[in-house]
Amino acid sequence: MILELNGMYAGLRFASAHIVFGHDTCGVIHGHSYYVDVKVCGAPSGEFGFICDFKVLKKIVKDICGKLDHKLLIPENHPNLTYSINGDYIEFTFCKGEKVKEYKIPLEDVAILPTTSTTAEELSKYFAEIIKKELQALNLNSSSIYWVETTVNEGIGQGASYRATMEH
């Protein structure tokens, strides 16, 4: 059975800026109003026959969204990006071939993510892996949950999905 949260209707959203470093059109700072859809596949269990309590799942996703909302998303592991944190600022440089772009942004305005990029593809993986870890840490029906899938939409009708399999 699959439990599903539609981000648009469940209020699972955040607005962030990002840079797809090296891309012709998306290689500049620009933003999206993101919506996060979540599916959890498992067997109903426990006293109430839930796969997972909607409240628990929504809280996890809203907490992640809250950390990204109104931030510039920076990928920690991009191969052509170097950064340093100096006091209250982050300075980062994109360098590939002859293309060099340097930035200095207040640290409170950024979210540094353990990803190689900040595309919808990477963000969907980021969300799914955090949700998976949180559900396992809570130990709520974790043995009866098979996978978690997230879709991060960069607006209506345009998104990427990732499925994280639960380890039992």
Image: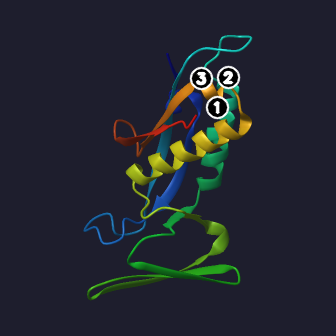
Q: Amino acid at mark 1?
A: Leu
Of circles 3 and 2, the one toward us is: 3
Q: CA distance from mark 1 to mark 3?
A: 15 Å
Which one is in front, 153 or 49? 49
Density class for disc 2 (Cα within 10 Å; few <14, some 14-19, many ≥20) is few
Q: Which amino acid lies under the numbered mark 2 shown in the image of this protein? A: Asp
Q: Is residue 120 above or below residue 49?
A: below
116 or 27: which is nearer to us?
116
Using the rendered view, name the quadrant where residue 71 is placed: bottom right
Dot 3 crowding, Cα within 10 Å, few <14, some 14–19, many 20+: some
Whether 4 is drawn above or below 100: the answer is: above
Nearest to viewer (mark 1 / mark 3): 3
Other-residue count near label 1 (Cα within 10 Å), few / some / many at <14 / 14–19 / ≥20: some
Residue type, mark 3 in image = Ser
Q: Depth check: 131 or 94 in front?
A: 131
* Horizontal relation, residue 136 to residue 147: left or right: right
Q: CA distance from mark 1 to mark 2?
A: 6 Å
User: Is 50 drawn above or below residue 109 in the view shown?
Assistant: above
Q: Residue at x 67, y 23 (%)?
A: 53
Residue at 62 percent of width and 44 percent of height:
133
Checking the image for residue 57, the label placed there is 1
Question: What's the distance in space between the residues labelled 3 and 2, CA to CA?
Answer: 13 Å
The secondary element bearing badge 1 is classed as helix
- Residue where numbered disc 3 is placed: 144
The percent position of residue 148, horizontal first and vertical second, equals 51, 34
Q: Which residue is more in the foreground, 60 or 72?
A: 60
* Quadrant position of residue 162: top left
Question: Residue drawn at (59%, 23%), measured in percent from left and top?
Answer: 144
Residue 53, numbered label: 2
